[in-house]
Image (cartoon, rainbow, N blue to C red):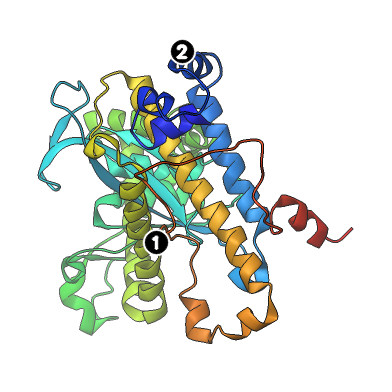
Amino acid sequence: MLAIFGYGTNTGIRAVASGGHAHSEDDIRYVRRRYLTPQVATDIAIAIANATFTARDTELWGEGTTTVASDSTHVRAYDQNIFTEWHSRYGGRGILIYWHIERGSMVVHSQALRASASEVHAMIEGAVRHGTTMKVEGNYVDSHGQTEIGFGVTRLLGFDLLPRIKQINKVKLYRVESGESDLYPRLTPAMTRPIRWELIEQNYDQMIKYATAIKQGTASTEAILRRFTESASHPTYQAMLEVGRAQKTIFVARYLRLRELQREIQEGLNVVESSNGANSVIFYGKGGDIATNRREELEMSVLCLRILQAALVYINTLMLQDVLADPESAELLKPADRRGLTPLFWQHVQPYGEVRLDVAKRLPLSGGADAAQQREPQ
């Protein structure tokens, strides 16, 4: 736990060891080397997410969601870091952490990326390989997380790509068939050529082959997209683009027509922004700058940050459920209050000063896994 705290807060093991926890720096470093691997850290984060899903009171939080929001966070890194790159959008040197957050504010996946990496492949990898019990059927992204190939691959993988597209007024809509110019006279300025269905039909088996490889983990999305990018004329890639163009046209038509969908996407992306705010409080050591240039150490910092944020949401969920289990407290909540209820808050977190930990004691919360098991029908 102390090693996770040191990495997840970016304060480091030496600073944690000097906090008077009865464990030396050598003890903590031994535990880190012997037991805390990237896979173990991932398993811990997944276990916390699953425990939260199990413990949630559906009367308070609603039924389990099937959508996630994903976006990147720019984290500054020392110039000596071999992963450090200049990012034009964020205007500084550093790396990217790509997050997948479900609607209830629980982080289900995280990835450390170079600043020049594609956010599309990161979005697909996280949605497919998050490892939790959650079933992802939709993924909210900002403009940087969507492309026509992204729409194509996500359609083949069986979940919806739901982006907030900048300059949506300039997006072109593809026709279903040729010779349909008179069917939609008001959309004529936005319409373009028909979808090449014959290209999709000719390469259907190969597209399914690549989609299966991504889903089964025998090939990474990044490797497949890089291969296609190097050979943009590849017929399977062109067919996937056609699928993406058709899917994007369907999405844009829905988005422009349904105000509910626009609000849903905006609310989902707001959750990611709130999550980034929590990360800035948790990851406070060294001014938030990553110093290490070892890949495993960098990934460990990202994974431990994910663990701490997941634990924060888990504890907050149980605390809120305990408070609102009192009928008098529950009656104080109006419908507007319930809509704004979130387990992602951190005003009670003390990033600075003395923090006393007693790992032999448990918090007196009744809404954990045991309570959830009691609620389940026998």
Q: Is residue 27 left or right of residue 272?
A: right
Residue 280 visible in the current orientation: yes
Residue 59 image point, x, y percent: 66, 73
User: Which residue type does callout 1 highlight?
Assistant: Val
Return the residue at label 1: 271
CA distance separating discs 1 and 2: 39 Å
User: Which residue type does callout 2 highlight?
Assistant: Asp
Residue at 68% of width from left, 76% of height from top? 326
Residue at 50% of width from left, 47% of height from top? 310
Is residue 44 or residue 176 the one in the foreground? Answer: 44
Residue 86 image point, x, y percent: 12, 35
Above or below — where is 34 with respect to 347? above
Kind of element beneath mark 2: helix
Mark drawn on residue 26: 2
Residue at 22% of width from left, 28% of height from top? 230
Residue 241 image point, x, y percent: 31, 48
Residue 303 visible in the current orientation: no
- Mark 1 or 2, closer to the camera: 2
Residue 146 image point, x, y percent: 30, 52
Is residue 31 or residue 126 the one in the foreground? Answer: 31
